[in-house]
Amino acid sequence: MSIKHGLGRGLGALINDGTVPAGGTPPIGTVSKKATTGVLKIPIRKIRKNPNQPRRTFPEETMADLTESIKNRGVLQPLLVRTAGDGYELIAGERRLRASAAAGLAEVPAIIMEATDNDSLEIALIENLQRENLNILEEAESYEVLANKFNLTQEQVAVRVGKARATVTNIMRIMSLPVETKQLIASDQLSAGHAKLLAGLEIKQEQILFAQRAVKENLSVRNLEKLIQKARRAPRKPRATKDDIPSTHISHLSDKLHRHFGTSVRIVPCKTLANGKKVRGTLELDFYSTDDLNRILDLIGITIE
């Protein structure tokens, strides 16, 4: 598994002193706080984690890979920090910080920035959103925080993170899912594909029921999509028909045949469809033994040789 150490496309646009290469051309934000230093070595013990870190899950497998990479090659991308008391507060790079500690490093390369609380939050959000391993629920929550905290439209959020507006809109819809469904997503029982399909349903109870069924039956995204499409498909209207024999006459005939044969009789009349086509009727007689069948055949006038 390859490990990406860059801060993501365009994050360099957040630091305009040339210390961190932009890496990409599209500007992604309005934060333009100058770094006060070049790359320094900072003791890990002096760095406290960002309380506004949008990422809540750090999968063991990917962290193990990153830790092993840092053991072999060191930390290739500096962390971003700001001064806080007699130490520093992390702005971006918590995965690298955690992996460095696990690798036994005492110091990590870092760039010290001048940044307000809002600046720090925005950079942390964008840095995480530009990575591919943020889970879909964390991504949706991050978009929502960006939109609400900084009073941004979905279009503006999309520009900041360098993604299409439709992508941001579809992912943000996941935040409207019921709590029960979001819990299944957070626990990785449902994938991003499942989440997007469920977010497209309008009725909350359907979102819950389809989510539970997807987990219970281990449905793939494609199979869940087929199930939803089938449920949405309007039932076929029954074809217009007309009984050729009135119901009152059917009842009269059934009663007479019952008395004649001494057994239950069912008559389904033939029908005429709206297009003139005929649908056959049926006549059923019950019998309970071979002797009973022979008795009925004698009454009909059929002799079995």
Image (spheres, grey):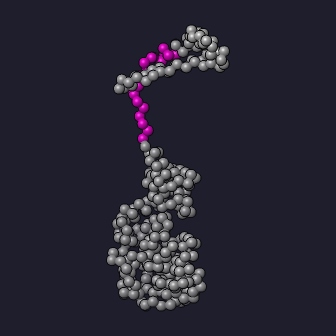
Q: Please give left or right for residue 172 compared with residue 64 in the image.
A: left
Extreme-front residue of the structure: 305
Q: Is residue 76 magenta?
A: no
Residue at the image position 50 percent from the left and 81 percent from the top:
90
In the rendered image, the quadrant that contains the C terminus is top right
Residue 144 location (% of width, % of height): 44, 66
Q: Is residue 292 above or below residue 106?
A: above
Of 294 and 222, the residue lying toward us: 294
Q: Is residue 250 magenta?
A: yes
Q: Please give left or right for residue 245 compared with residue 164 in the image.
A: right
Residue 141 makes an appearance in the image: no
Q: Quadrant of residue 244?
A: top left
Q: Please give left or right for residue 169 compared with residue 88 in the image.
A: left
Residue 38 makes an appearance in the image: yes
Q: How many marks?
A: 0
Residue 145 location (% of width, % of height): 44, 69
Residue at the image position 60 percent from the left and 18 percent from the top:
264
Residue at the image position 44 percent from the left and 79 percent from the top:
6
Residue 272 location (% of width, % of height): 40, 22
Residue 268 location (% of width, % of height): 50, 21
Q: Is residue 141 above or below residue 236?
A: below
Residue at the image position 37 percent from the left and 81 percent from the top:
22
Q: Is residue 223 above or below residue 241?
A: below
Of 266 and 38, the residue lying toward us: 266
Magenta range:
234-252
